[in-house]
Image (tube, coloured by chain):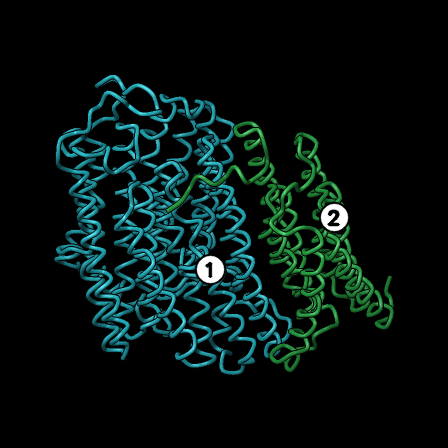
Amino acid sequence: MIEALVIVIVGAPTAAGLGAWLADRRLATGLAFAGLAASIAAGVLLAGIVFTRGPVRAWDGLVVVDALGAYLLVLVLVVALIALAGSPTHLAHEGRVGNFLAHDSGQYYALLSWFVAGLAAVPLLDNLGLVWVAIEATTIVSALLVGFVRTPQAIEAAWKYLILGSIGIGFALLGTLLLYASSIGVLGETSDALAWTRLTEIAPRLDPGLARLAFLFALAGYGTKAGLVPFHTWLPDAHSQAPSPISALLSGAALAVALYALARFHLVTVAALGPAFSSTLLVVFGLLSLAVALPFIVAQGDVKRLLAYSSIEHLGLATLALGFGGHLALLGLSLHLISHGLAKATIFLAAGRLVAERGSRRIGRLAGSLARSPADGQAFVVAALVLAGLPPSSVFVAEIAILFGGVQAGWGPAAAAAAVILALTVAGLLFHVVRMSVGPPAPSGSAGPSGPPAPLGERRSPTAARALLLAVPLSIVVIAGLWTPSPLADALEQVTVVLGGGRG
Amino acid sequence: MTIDPGTARELVDACAAAIVLLGVGLAATRSIGRAIWLVAIQSSLTGVAALGVGLATGAGHLLIGGILAIGVKGFVVPLVLGSILRRSALRRERHPLLGPRVSLVAAVAIVFVASAAANGAVLGASVAASRALPAAIAQVLTGLLIVMTRRKALSLVVGLLVFENGIALTAFSLTYGMPLVVELGVLFDVLIAVVVAWVYARRMLDVLGTTSTDRLRSLRG
């Protein structure tokens, strides 16, 4: 049963990708949707089993899914659905301005499906070596997507992403290796010597020197993938140059997956060395990411880079929460990751549409977006307010929980510093939102380098579907800030227990 | 077929010494064609060392891993890189950030630092570290040096491969390699990373007319 579900979750998008690679545009779109739909059905079923009956195992422990894994799986699949649903409109636009050939659609949907399959595989695997393999595979596949539009800037971004990402994640492999070296000192060369379930059990007997070094390398490696400062330099380029649905997937899901891998290392390290060592490092790098992202948000002129730096800020906050530990901060973290994923994916789709209609990414040139494209303009404003952390939204609740949790856990000064930075970030974001949303539209004579504007009415996606695509995830985030249904609260509680080092 | 442990140890030592020399050569050369062949030999030697220990200890996963490493990193990857090089007009590093002489000195310095680090504190105490460990650390650092100081796309890929050889050798000297399924996954990732680099190098040639990453400086802030 569990085996079959896992095969569908990873196998369906993989197979759909193979088909899409060879198919024409319509068939490729259909295949990608069918693959993801099957994956979501199986994923939700699996998550339901985990949350009601506890962790599940398959194939002799190769696959183990606990509450944290199930949570991340659902996050990946939901964000993937948003990204995929936004893809046809985006591709139609890129095709119109000639950045993109119609027969490339098949490749796009194939790579997108494989990207999702790789991301979905990570939370299922109970082997830190295979977790590394899956994450590196997503890096490589998504590098092809980042440079999918063949402009010099996109090629530059993809190239940086590929080289810096591979070097960075090479360090994570070294970290995995050192952990393996310390683990076989205890277990011998068994097949479960890299299983995080086993590692947590035997952690007190691991060589402390090796465990410490392993965490440092894992922090540098997965920190690169999660966009932690100072390993973040590839992120604003890749997330801003990628096609917008891919940006949505990178920011909303891929960063969370990297943080998940780091969290597994953190849990093993805490069990081995006590909380002081790795928690302090996570707090330091989390705060550093928040602090460095701030000026780039305030002074940003490019809307997609603005969103990319906002992702660095939010992942910094999540890392901080992981470092704080304690029940309240971790509860905040579990609420935060999924809320950020939903809101960030939506805002990238909305921003992508605004940019496409305007032919420019400059915030100054996007003035008057509310009047020009109401649906996407409104979605952008609401999502930006949510991401700024204003109430009512689950991002707000999560941020408050993380900050108060930090104080409770004895990290008062760090929490206070984070609160100040977050407040300044709100101001910076609001400034840009106001500039973009209201005001007279900039003269539309120059549609920019991307060609003539679309003939009205002709190529628009069905408006109702578009509005639904943008409104549903945002409504969830906003309503979850006011009221949490008890199954959701129960699930988050279980995730929090796992993040706190318990068994979910 | 088996060989006795003493011979295996000598084989590994010889491979490690050759890998260090090749690393120094890689850091110093400006010819990209030569760099590709040097890194191919270096990768193959990493595989040969794994084979030697596999034959001595009867560890099947080292034999499979070693043979695949030689095949993938020693032959397939250099052929892919060579095919990009043939399309590219520039076949030398014209203006690396460090000249060949400085690079040579830096590479030699790295070897000494790596030996000191490997003999030092943490690792030596707990693990039966083989004598390949200093060579492994040196290759990780040499790979980083190449990636940081070169500008041609192909040179960066070569640096990445040297870095990866260092990691493979570390794996092998600390723990006699990772579990086979992980080793296979890592090799597969290396292979597709090189293929993707090949795709992008071709696009750089098509769109920018060069594989010099100097032209890739527009994204800031």
Q: Is residue A328 left or right of residue A158?
A: left
Mark 2 belongs to which subunit?
A: B
Instruction: Pick whichever, A187 or A324, lies toward us.
Output: A324
Tell whether label 1 touches label 2 (CB within 8 Å): no
Relative to B126, does residue A54 appear above or below in the rendering? above
**Quadrant hosting residue B110:** bottom right
Q: Which x, y percent locates residue A71? A: 34, 58
Q: Is residue A338 left or right of residue B175?
A: left
Residue shown at 37% from the left, 28% from the top? A91
Q: Which x, y percent locates residue B193? A: 58, 45
Q: Which x, y percent locates residue B17? A: 79, 64
Q: Is residue A482 left or right of residue A192?
A: left
Relative to A268, does residue A296 appear above or below in the rendering? above
* Residue on which disc 2 sits: B40
Chain coloured cyan here: A
Label 2 sits on what residue type?
Answer: Ala
Q: Quadrant of the N terminus of chain B?
A: bottom right
Q: What is the crowding at mark 2: few (fewer than 14 residues within 10 Å), some, or many (at least 20)?
A: many
Tag 1 secondary structure:
helix
* Residue on which disc 1 sits: A222
Q: Can the viewer see residue A16 in this picture?
A: no
What colour is chain B?
green
Tag 2 secondary structure:
helix
Instruction: Pick whichever, A126 or A436, lies toward us.
Output: A436
Relative to A345, does residue B186 appear above or below in the rendering? below
- Residues indicated by labels 2 and 1 sit on the same polypeptide chain: no
Residue shown at 22% from the left, 32% from the top? A465
Q: Can the viewer see residue A120 in this picture?
A: yes
Residue shown at 63% from the left, 81% from the top? B126
Mark 1 belongs to which subunit?
A: A
Label 1 sits on what residue type?
Answer: Tyr
Q: What is the crowding at mark 1: few (fewer than 14 residues within 10 Å), some, or many (at least 20)?
A: many
